[in-house]
Amino acid sequence: MTGLISFMNLNIILSLALFFASIIIPFCQIIFIDKYFRFQNIPEILLKYALFFNVGCLFITGCAGQFLYAPEISAGVGWGWSPFQYELAFSELGLGILGLISPLFTKDFWLATIIAAAVWLVGGSAVHLYSLYFEGNMAITTANFVIIWNILIAAWLIACYLAYAKSWTRFYKLMTEWSRSRKGNS
């Protein structure tokens, strides 16, 4: 069980590190790299890094954990080991790849990635909560940080997208008004 506890601690540390990286690195980019910085770019930059770190890297590491430590993880959840865990690992791999390549695409791809990741994260938390409250499963990985963390990450991704969508809409309106005023002055 000690190995499982240290594995859980590693999971918590890694999750927190990826979350803070998704906030700190974009601001470092804004401060030190972007020469032509505009405030309307902040939500887009934050969203790209949130997708890369909080979906891409997080789900890839989840895949590695599910694949390489399947018996330990199933024991920690209080469920029996099953080859289905490998399917779970590959679903995490797919979501992780979506997160890693998201910065290369645009808002429609980002929204689809966020919906898939949020459903997976909140759904996983719901399954663990059900197991905790209705089945009395008090296993170490069922009753812990992961339930709340998954919901918070889903909320963070949605908040980043909504901030981006709001800033993009505002920018689009400003550009449309500017374009109309230019046509009127010609």
Image (cartoon, rainbow, N blue to C red):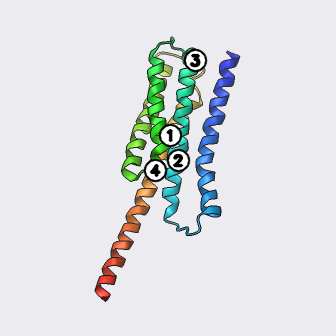
Nearest the viewer among 136 and 119 is 119
Q: Secondary structure at mark 4?
A: helix
Query: In the rendered structure, are the residues bearing label 4 and label 3 in contact, judged by CB atoms less than 8 Å apart?
Result: no
- Image quarter for residue 37? bottom right
Q: Residues within 10 Å of mark 4 (few under 14, many from 20)?
A: few
Q: CA distance from mark 3 to mark 2?
A: 30 Å
Q: Report the mark closest to the observer, 4 or 2.
A: 4
Q: Earlier in the sequence, mark 1 or mark 3?
A: 1
Q: Residues within 10 Å of mark 3 (few under 14, many from 20)?
A: some
Query: In the rendered structure, are the residues bearing label 3 and label 2 in contact, judged by CB atoms less than 8 Å apart?
Result: no
The answer to whether residue 180 shows anywhere in this view is yes
- 17 up-or-down from 3: above or below: below
Numbered mark located on residue 139 in the image = 3
Q: Amino acid at mark 3?
A: Ala
Q: CA distance from mark 1 to mark 4?
A: 14 Å
Q: Earlier in the sequence, mark 1 or mark 4?
A: 1
Q: Residue at x 53, y 41 (%)?
A: 54
